[in-house]
Amino acid sequence: MIYKTLTLDDSMQSIELAGKLLRNGEVVAIPTETVYGLAANAFDEAAVAKIFSAKGRPADNPLIVHICEISQISDIAAEIPQLAADCAEAFWGGPLTMVLPKKPELPYITSGGLDTVGIRMPSHETARAIIKAAGVPLAAPSANLSGSPSPTSASDVLADMRGRIPAIVDGGECDAGVESTVISVKNSGITILRPGRITREMLLRLTPNVSIDRGVLHEVDSSAVAASPGMKYKHYSPAANVLIISGSAEKFAEYVCDYAADNPDKSVLCLTFSGKELDGASGRKPPQIILGESSEQQAHRLFSALREADRRGAKTVFARCPEKIGVGLAVYNRLIRAAGFEVIEL
Ligand code: TXA
Ligand code: MG
C-alpha cells in the first residue's frame, strides 16, 4: 500500500483525526519529548504489523507501549513491583520506559514474542492528547527506517516514511533528541538496558541497586540472546563512516584538522562537542556541526547532525568520545553504535 503521507499540525482537530486513524487500525507518526514515534493500537495485531513493515523492523525487536495516565499501566503489565510504581511516580510523564511482565491480552507481535513489555508515559502534551484521542495504548518505536538515526523533527520522519504511512503529526523539534531510558525493574533493583535523559544518577535516588547491562557499552553478538533485543541490531548509522576519537580537545582538533588536510578527496565533517568551532594549529579546519558543550545539548542535536552529515554528502564524520556519566552515557551509547564500536585512542 502506498499512502499520500499528510503532515498535520498539532491542533485539536489534527489530534482528533490522528485518534480516528489510530482507532481504525492505521499507523500515525507522533511527536514525543524524546524522538518521533510510529504509533498504532498496541492491542491490534494487524495495526502493529503495519509498524513493522513501514520500518522494515525485525519481528523479534519489541515495541514500547505508550500510555497517557499512570493507572493504564495495569492494563498492560501483569505485575507491578513497588520499585516500578516508585519509578512511575518519580519520572512519568517523561523519558523512561519500564520493562515488566506483560498481560496475556497484549499480543506477542507487540512484545516481539517476549513475555515482558516496555511501557512508557510520555510528558509531551500532544503525544498524551493523541493517546487519549485514540482511546487505546499505542505501540510506538522510533519513526525511522530500521537502522537509520531516530527522527527528531517531522521533516526527518517524512524523509524516511513518505508513502509508507497515512499521517505525521508535526509537534516541532523533539526536546531530548535521544530515545527514552529503558530499564528492567524488579523489587531487587534496576538494570539499565538503554541509557537516556533519565540517568543512572537519577535512578540511584530511588534504589542503591542500579546496574548497567553489558550491552549498553559493548557490542552484542547478533546470534546471542540480548537483554534487550534492540542491542543486537545495527543502529543509528548514517551512510557516512563515523569515527570516535578519545583524547584531549587539543589532540582531537589536531587529528581531525590534519586528517581533513591530508584527505582533500574525502569529505570530512566534524561534530564539535563545545560551544564553538574547533581550530587546528594549522588553521586547516574541516566543516563542522556544533553540538554544544553540555551532554543535554549534544543529545538534543546528535541524530539530526548524523542526518545532516548524510545530506551534506560527508564520507567521514568525526566525534569526540563522550563522557560516560549522566546524559553523556546516552550520547556514548548511540555514537558507539553509529561507529560500529570502534574508538580511536590518541
Ligand atoms: O523514546 C522512546 O523510547 C521512543 C519514543 C517514540 O517513545 N521509542 C523508541 O522505541 O525508541 P524503539 O522501538 O525505537 O526502541 C525500543 C527499545 C528497543 O531497543 C527494544 O529492543 C527495547 O526498547 N525493548 C522494548 N521492549 C522490550 C522488552 N520487553 N525487553 C527488553 N527490551 C525491550
Ligand atoms: Mg528505534
Image (tube, grey):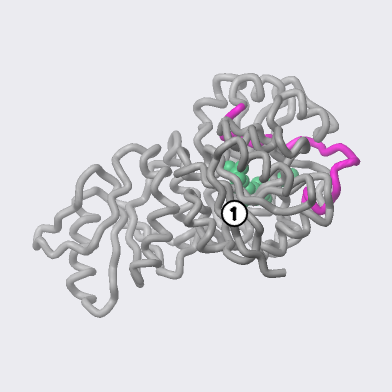
Vertical placement of residue 22 versus 325, above or below: below
Please give the name of the residue rendered at 44% of the width and 46% of the height, measured from the top-left corner.
331
Vertical placement of residue 211 versus 341, above or below: above
* Residue 271 visible in the snapshot: yes
Residue indicated by mark 1: 143
Left-right relation of 315 to 282: right
Left-right relation of 223 to 314: right
155 in the magenta segment: no
Left-right relation of 136 to 146: right
**Residue behind label 1 places its C-beta within 8 angstroms of ligand 1:** yes
Magenta: main secondary structure equals loop
Quadrant showing the C terminus: bottom left
Which residue lies most toward the front here?
Answer: 13
* Residue 35 visible in the snapshot: no
Give x and y (percent) for residue 330: 48, 43
Give x and y (percent) for residue 304: 42, 53
Task: Report the span colored magenta.
Answer: 93-111
Vertical placement of residue 144 versus 263, above or below: above
Give x and y (percent) for residue 234: 57, 63
Which residue lies most toward the right here?
Answer: 104
Residue 57 position by quadrant: bottom right
Please give the name of the residue rendered at 72% of the width and 69% of the height, measured from the top-left corner.
1
Q: What kind of element bears circle 1?
A: loop
Give x and y (percent) for residue 20: 73, 44
106 in the magenta segment: yes
Q: Amino acid at mark 1?
A: Ala
Residue placed most toward the observer, 262 or 32: 32
Residue placed most toward the observer, 302 or 216: 302
Which residue lies most toward the left here?
Answer: 282
Q: Residues within 10 Å of mark 1 (few under 14, many from 20)?
A: many
Please give the name of the residue rendered at 20% of the width and 46% of the height, measured from the top-left corner.
276
